């Protein structure tokens, strides 16, 4: 319990409250919260709308991030993307997760209150089987994954469908470190 509360407090301190990231102002991208926006801008020559990065956090050595190439000034939120853009992002993340982890994958998007980066990004990793809980919906394809406003979401395969857990803020705990 103590570790969980400590982690929550630490994450809350680093959460994005506002965002100074502006692709038109390169100096603004030097802030830590803008590092993924800066990486997205480096992808301009790629025809793919989603790209992948290895998570540089040493505590997350087995994680990959899926990011949309699209950037803008300020904070991006998952619910701010169109349904087709979200489907594109989820489809790419799930395809990469399957390639990396077979059927033991999970993907997670942290809620707006705990995010430390302005750019939307999906965490990809191996499913932490202890993270499974009873509150979820099942969908058949990425286009059916909801976009809860401000909340996090995590997804894993189960019985030929996708189990979607929404409404939490910290979701990447569903992934093995």
Image (cartoon, rainbow, N blue to C red):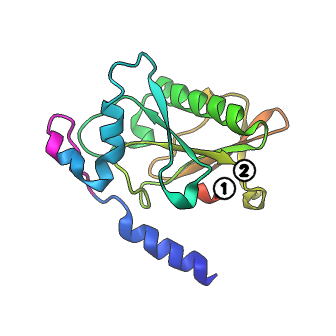
Q: Which sits in the foreground, 10 or 77?
A: 10
The spot of residue 39 in percent (x, y) is 35, 37
Quadrant in which the C terminus appears: bottom right
The spot of residue 66 in percent (x, y) is 51, 37
Q: Earlier in the sequence, mark 2 or mark 1?
A: 2
Write the residue at 50% across / 31% down. Answer: 86
Q: Which residues are magenta?
A: 18-27
Q: Is residue 46 above or below residue 26?
A: above
Q: Is residue 4 visible?
A: yes
Q: Is residue 170 visible?
A: no
Find the distance from the CA under tag 2 to the CA under tag 1. Answer: 6 Å
Lateral position of residue 62 relative to residue 17, left or right: right
Write the residue at 64% across / 46% down. Answer: 125
Quadrant in which the N terminus appears: bottom right
Q: Residues within 10 Å of mark 1 (few under 14, many from 20)?
A: many
Q: Quadrant of residue 133?
A: bottom right
User: In the image, is residue 173 part of the stretch drawn in magenta?
Assistant: no
The answer to the question of whether label 2 and label 1 lie on touching residues, with beta carbons closer than 8 A, is: yes
The spot of residue 91 in percent (x, y) is 60, 27
Q: What kind of secondary structure does the magenta stretch mostly adopt?
A: loop
Lateral position of residue 141 relative to residue 16, left or right: right
Write the residue at 71% across / 50% down. Answer: 136
Q: Which residue is mark 1?
A: 174
Q: Residues within 10 Å of mark 2 (few under 14, many from 20)?
A: many
Label at residue 127: 2
Q: Which sits in the foreground, 78 or 93?
A: 93
Residue at the extreme right: 159
Q: Secondary structure at mark 2?
A: loop
């Amino acid at each position: 319990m103590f570790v969980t509360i400590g982690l929550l407090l630490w994450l809350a301190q680093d959460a994005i409250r506002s965002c100074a990231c502006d692709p038109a102002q390169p100096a603004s991208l030097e802030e830590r919260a803008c590092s993924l926006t800066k990486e997205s801008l480096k992808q301009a020559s790629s025809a793919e709308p989603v790209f992948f990065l290895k998570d540089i956090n040493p505590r997350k050595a087995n994680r990959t991030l899926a990011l949309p190439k699209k950037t803008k000034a300020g904070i991006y939120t998952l619910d701010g993307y169109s349904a087709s853009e979200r489907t594109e992002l989820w489809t790419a993340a799930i395809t990469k997760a399957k390639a990396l982890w077979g059927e033991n994958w999970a993907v997670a998007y942290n809620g707006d209150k705990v995010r430390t980066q302005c750019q939307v990004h999906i965490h990809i990793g191996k499913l932490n089987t202890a993270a499974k809980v009873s509150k979820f919906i099942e969908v058949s394809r990425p286009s059916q994954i909801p976009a809860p406003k401000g909340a996090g979401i995590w997804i894993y395969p189960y019985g030929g469908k996708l189990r979607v857990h929404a409404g939490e803020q910290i979701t990447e705990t569903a992934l093995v470190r």
